[in-house]
Image (cartoon, grey):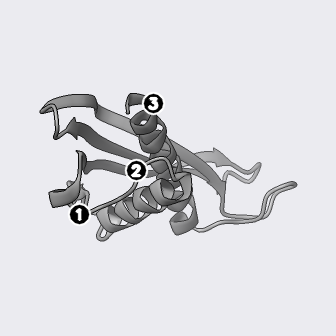
Amino acid sequence: MFENGTTQVGLEQNVTSAVVARFVADNHLRVVDEREADAVLRGKVISYRNTVFGFSVQTQAQEYQAAIGVEVVLKDLVRNRELWKADNLVKTANYYVVDVPGQSAKTEVEGREDAIRKIADEIVARTVQSW
């Protein structure tokens, strides 16, 4: 379970769920209880921003950017060493709040989910590569 160092309630649960689901889908490594594990992944959500990224010609906000930052460390429990660490892994996702050609309108929650998926992809890629 990721920790939450932000004021965004439930963000740690969303990140944890996405990372676990990504490991399961990848199928290179199994997610098990820590007592059975050869390695442990620990993380903390350290930042969350949702900011205006683009305006319409009427100067109305129409594009936003969700940005999430996490601290992550993967530790090999067998050899008692750190396999990889990221102090500030940040992923962003841009989304429009109005329909634009080629893209439907999204909510902040959907934009945040896109950024979380990118974080999960990065964590799994780094972990599989390190293993």
Q: Which residue is mark 1?
A: 33
Quadrant of the rendering where the N terminus is positioned: bottom left
x and y percent of residue 89 in the render?
37, 36
> Counting other residues with Cα less than 10 Å from the Cα at mark 3, is it few (<14), some (14-19), or many (20 or more)?
few
| Camera-nearest residue between 69 and 21 | 21
In the rendering, at what x and y percent does residue 115 appear? 51, 51
- Which residue lies at the image location 45% right of the left edge and 61% below the top edge? 18
**Residue at image point 55% right, 58% down:** 25
Element on which disc 3 rests: helix
Disc 2 and disc 3 in contact, CB within 8 angstroms: no
The kind of residue on which mark 3 rests is Gln
Amino acid at circle 2: Arg
Q: Say which of 11 and 100 sits in front.
A: 11
The quadrant the C terminus occupies is top left
Which quarter of the picture shows residue 79?
A: top left
* Nearest to viewer (mark 2 / mark 1): 1
As measured in the structure, the alpha-carbon distance from the residue carrying label 2 to the one carrying label 1 is: 32 Å
Q: Earlier in the sequence, mark 2 or mark 1?
A: 1
Which sits earlier in the primary sequence, circle 1 or circle 3?
1
- Secondary structure under tag 2 reads strand
The image position of residue 88, as x and y in percent, is: 31, 34
Which residue appears farthest toward the left when viewing the image? 80
Q: Amino acid at mark 1?
A: Asp
Q: Position of residue 77 (x, y in %)?
A: 16, 41
- Disc 3 marks which residue? 129
Q: CA distance from mark 1 to mark 3?
A: 22 Å
Residue tagged 2? 49
